[in-house]
Image: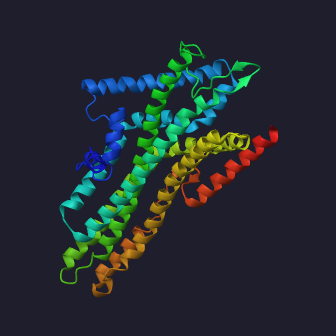
């Protein structure tokens, strides 16, 4: 099967924007439109098995506090975020269905009109969506390869003649921490770690794709506003103005729903990634004469930064696009309309002036300025930890 066939297989006409992402989430069992099937039950069971193993590490770290176990959790924080993301996704599953159903109905309705200008906007942002998503999937694949191979590179270290066998996670597993039990334990950790990685990649690219969708639909709103005045038909112009207002109001409603779904997760992620980057940078600064470990650590840091940048870049893009809607109302042929329609255009310009902002928690706006602030906070955390060593 060629790459083109694989990419074609991932597409779903029912969900023009998020078809590939739903198939990935469906593969992991997070997206389950048919949960009563045998495969659906099996994937649901697998989800609870993964959650149980990861929670065992948190319980183990809390009950028998071990600095090495805590360091592992901090070092691989993005993996542990996959547990939080998947749990919140399941908790709010019906709301996610509502949001994705809205996206599907909007895009299918617009594509059915076969309007060239609308098709150009939709195809443009969907193509951008695919480029970003597949790039991130490829980056995650290579990042996982470097992460899951790193412990074996460190197993050659000896302290007082005793070999040290490093782990990715510190689950409650009834196997020895030395071979041959070590390799069985690492196999379980690798399998479960890759499943959680699929949770992370699926959730992250779905969220970014929805942000791209909202930015694209705001461009579509601008197009509607520019074309709303029909000089030959006053009633049609009035209906077009009302339709622009209705569509923009609906977009705002669903952006609020989307923000409520991602805000708590993004707040925890914001805190974790700031700490995680500081810890990883300290480890990198302590690496001497170990090029392989240095390279894997650098790839991991790069993946974390790109992951964070994607969220804040496209959230910022939605904010920027939302500022253009109000201006676009006055790019219409409003001078040719009668006074009543001109008043309606002016009211529409005021009604569409709302700037859309996504938040990570109650205070943090997701923007490029905030992204720079996170990098500064990570560096400050690094200097703090480094000064206490």
- Residue 313: x, y in percent? 51, 58
Task: Identify which residue, 83 or 106, lies in the foreground.
Answer: 83
Q: Is residue 166 visible?
A: yes
**In what quadrant of the picture does the N terminus appear?**
top left
Location of residue 202 by image quarter: top left
Q: Is residue 260 visible?
A: no
Task: Identify which residue, 386 or 251, lies in the foreground.
Answer: 386
Residue 186, placed above or below residue 120: above
Residue 126, placed above or below residue 190: below
Q: In the image as oriented, which residue stretches furthest toward the bottom?
A: 336
Residue 244, placed above or below residue 16: below
Q: How is the image coloured?
A: rainbow
- Residue 375: x, y in percent? 64, 53
Q: Residue at x 36, y 58 (%)?
A: 251
Q: Residue at x 27, y 57 (%)?
A: 107
Q: Residue at x 61, y 42 (%)?
A: 297
- Residue 154: x, y in percent? 64, 30
**In what quadrant of the picture does the C terminus appear?**
top right
Q: Count every numbered label the image shows and give the total.
A: 0
The reply, left or right, for residue 117 in relation to residue 174 is: left
Location of residue 294 by image quarter: top right
Q: Residue at x 62, y 30 (%)?
A: 72
- Residue 170: x, y in percent? 59, 23
Task: Identify which residue, 152 or 13, lies in the foreground.
Answer: 152
Location of residue 371 by image quarter: bottom right
């Amino acid at each position: 099967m060629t790459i083109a066939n694989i990419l074609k297989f991932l597409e779903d006409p029912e969900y023009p924007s998020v078809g590939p992402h739903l198939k990935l989430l469906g593969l992991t069992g997070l997206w389950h439109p048919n949960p009563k099937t045998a495969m659906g039950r099996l994937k649901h069971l697998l989800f609870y098995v993964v959650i149980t193993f990861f929670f065992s590490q948190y319980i183990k770290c809390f009950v028998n506090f071990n600095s090495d176990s805590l360091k592992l959790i901090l070092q691989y924080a993005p993996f542990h975020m996959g547990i939080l993301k998947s749990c919140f996704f399941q908790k709010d599953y019906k709301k996610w269905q509502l949001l994705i159903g809205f996206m599907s109905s909007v895009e299918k309705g617009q594509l059915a009109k076969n309007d060239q200008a609308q098709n150009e906007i939709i195809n443009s942002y969907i193509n951008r969506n695919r480029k970003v998503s597949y790039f991130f999937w490829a980056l995650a694949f290579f990042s996982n390869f470097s992460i899951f191979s790193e412990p074996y590179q460190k197993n050659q270290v000896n302290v007082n003649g005793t070999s040290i066998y490093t782990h990715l996670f510190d689950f409650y597993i009834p196997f020895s921490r030395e071979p041959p039990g070590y390799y069985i334990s690492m196999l379980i950790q690798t399998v479960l770690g890759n499943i959680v990685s699929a949770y992370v990649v699926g959730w992250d690219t779905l969220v970014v794709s929805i942000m791209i969708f909202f930015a694209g639909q705001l461009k579509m709103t601008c197009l509607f506003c520019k074309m709303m005045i029909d000089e030959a038909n006053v009633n049609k112009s009035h209906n077009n103005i009302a339709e622009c207002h209705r569509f923009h109001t609906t977009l705002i409603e669903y952006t609020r729903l989307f923000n409520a779904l991602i805000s708590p997760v993004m707040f925890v992620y914001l805190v974790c990634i700031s700490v995680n980057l500081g810890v990883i940078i300290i480890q990198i600064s302590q690496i001497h004469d170990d090029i392989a470990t240095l390279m894997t650590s650098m790839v991991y840091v790069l993946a974390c930064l790109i992951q964070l940048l994607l969220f804040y870049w496209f959230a910022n893009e939605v904010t920027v696009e939302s500022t253009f809607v109000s201006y676009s109302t006055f790019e219409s042929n409003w001078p040719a309309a009668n006074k009543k329609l001109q008043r309606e255009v002016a009211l529409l310009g005021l009604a569409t002036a709302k700037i859309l902002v996504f938040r990570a928690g109650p205070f943090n706006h997701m923007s490029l300025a905030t992204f720079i602030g996170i990098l500064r906070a990570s560096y400050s955390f690094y200097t703090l930890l480094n000064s206490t060593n």
